[in-house]
Amino acid sequence: MMIERDKPLLYGFAAPAELLDDFGVRTGDRRHDDTRCAMLGQLAHLKMRGKADRSVSYSRRKEWWASPKADYFDRTPMSFATVSSAVYDFEAAGVIEHERAKPCRGGSGRQSRIRLRDDAAWPAIVPVKLVGPTVLLRDANKMPLPLPDTDLVRRVQRQMDRINDDLARITIGGPHVDGLVVNCGDGRRIWLEPRLRRIFNNGSFSQGGRAYGALQNVPKAIRATLTLNGAPVVTPDDGTDYKSLHIGLLYAEDGIDIPDSVDLYDIGTDRWPRPVIKVATNILINALRRQQALASICRELARDFRDPAADDTERGDIIARRRAWQLLMQRYGAEAADLIEAIEARHDRVAGAFGSGAGLRLQRIDSDMLLGVIDQLLRRGIPVWPIHDEILAPAAQAGQVREAMQAALLRVKNRLCGKTLRVTAFLAESCASQGFEVPHYGGDGALVVLCPDPDLSPSEANSFEKTGSAISQSSHVKYGGLVPIDVGPEFATFAGGVLPERLREAVLHEIGARGLTQEKLAAYLGLSRPQLTNALRGRFGLGREPAARLRQLMAG
């Protein structure tokens, strides 16, 4: 059973300071007031998502705040003093309900909790803003962790800052939008904060990584009526989302490239509707254990039968929710077990990944892919907005968005399958006709051959087999799938020395786009792997000869 936990206290959102005056809790001290804005912002964010009954947990123990568990808060205004003072004043003002955990020597592992009072004089809409870093690392209990000072973190942070700067220039409109507020029609009004935060899980940058923002809380039916810079958007059904993404990636990891025309949610029976099969399949991929998946699929079946007991799993205290889960297991356990068996029989090649928590690992893959596409499109001046594995895009430019998404998916499948996938000449010409032509690949559209091809001449194939890193031209269009980056005339004048940051990013992008490795690129440039690594980090420069070879490579 999956009992939803409290949300841990987080310095991630901020309500306007005027709200402190409305509740009479302003102190005049900057650290105290910033802490209070952040705590009210987190409660407002939960209310905006329709989860006002969820609690936020925090520690009342000084020892906890002085331990490594609280290292995340070192660079925030939050501390034992500011948080404890805020909770005391919020409770006195009638804003929150406060459940104090009983003190216990050494700590009991249970923290105190706060939640919004149902009768609190809360505004109809609170303009919640994101504060703190736009990259968040959480542990297995979803507690925030301090970010390490690494090249990966800095690169991800730069990309998120770049994307957020571009998103801030997009105007969202529509019949349900009033300024920056969306009326969802279900009593909720959502403040459209034009920033995203990328969240990694389980203390690892290899898990999770999806970007989250306010727009994902807007119902699909409302999102379909929005406009971006005045242009109506297309729905994901028109091809601006990835179909059967995670199950398809599992097959790619097994070396099997499933064509888009194959419906991976068709398990050969009409006993269950396709939407239920889709959700159940993704539950199996995400669940850490089979029993956990079984319980979640029971709830999905209950929702399909419009059983009100499905919603009881999210209501009341933990005892009431546990009883609701037990009731669902009794009613739908056998049906859920049959559905799991049918899905495993249909996908026996990848069934070993079910119940293994593979979903977070696959999220890192799909988030890198989608955010790379978003970054490119925004640089091209196309207003787009990411929502998990789909892109909200103007209808007039949907073709360009679809082509970029398909190219990125081909690159990922290339890497997972351990082979180079063919990109049709039609796709390459279509990308070029829609503004994706890249000068440094040459005017004839010729792209780089990454692996032996049956159509290569004997001399070309022999060269590849001997070196293992041949970089040769061919009229056959085969590349990693990522639309190449346009660096303009910058490389034409680069004669050596330290690579500027923009050119370093272009080289890293090119390595992925061509399916190369740093070892192969280093050998081509006449460098060792450590020398190339240091050059790509801006620590050391390149000599004239490696710089000339790099210019030649980037020029196609």
Image (cartoon, grey):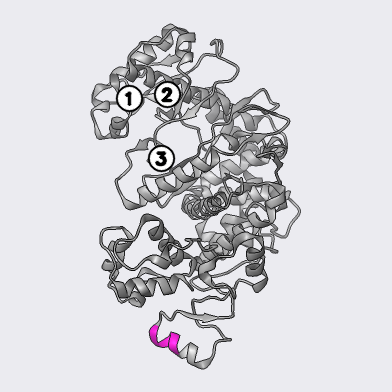
Kindly report which numbered mark, 3 or 1, lies closer to the viewer in this rendering.
Answer: 1
Residue 329 appears in view? yes
Which stretch is magenta?
Answer: 463-467
Is 377 or 114 nearer to us in this picture? 377
Q: Is residue 35 left or right of residue 539?
A: right
Disc 2 is placed on an element classified as helix
Q: Which residue is mark 2?
A: 38
Is 119 or 377 nearer to us in this picture? 377
Which quadrant of the structure image shows residue 435?
bottom right
Does residue 366 show up magenta in the picture?
no
Disc 3 is placed on an element classified as strand
User: Is residue 477 positioned above or below 66 on the image?
Assistant: below
Which amino acid is tagged 3? Answer: Leu
Q: Earlier in the sequence, mark 3 or mark 1?
A: 1
Tell me whether circle 2 and circle 3 mark residues in contact (CB < 8 Å): no
Tell me whether circle 2 and circle 1 mark residues in contact (CB < 8 Å): yes
Which quadrant of the structure image shows residue 332?
top right
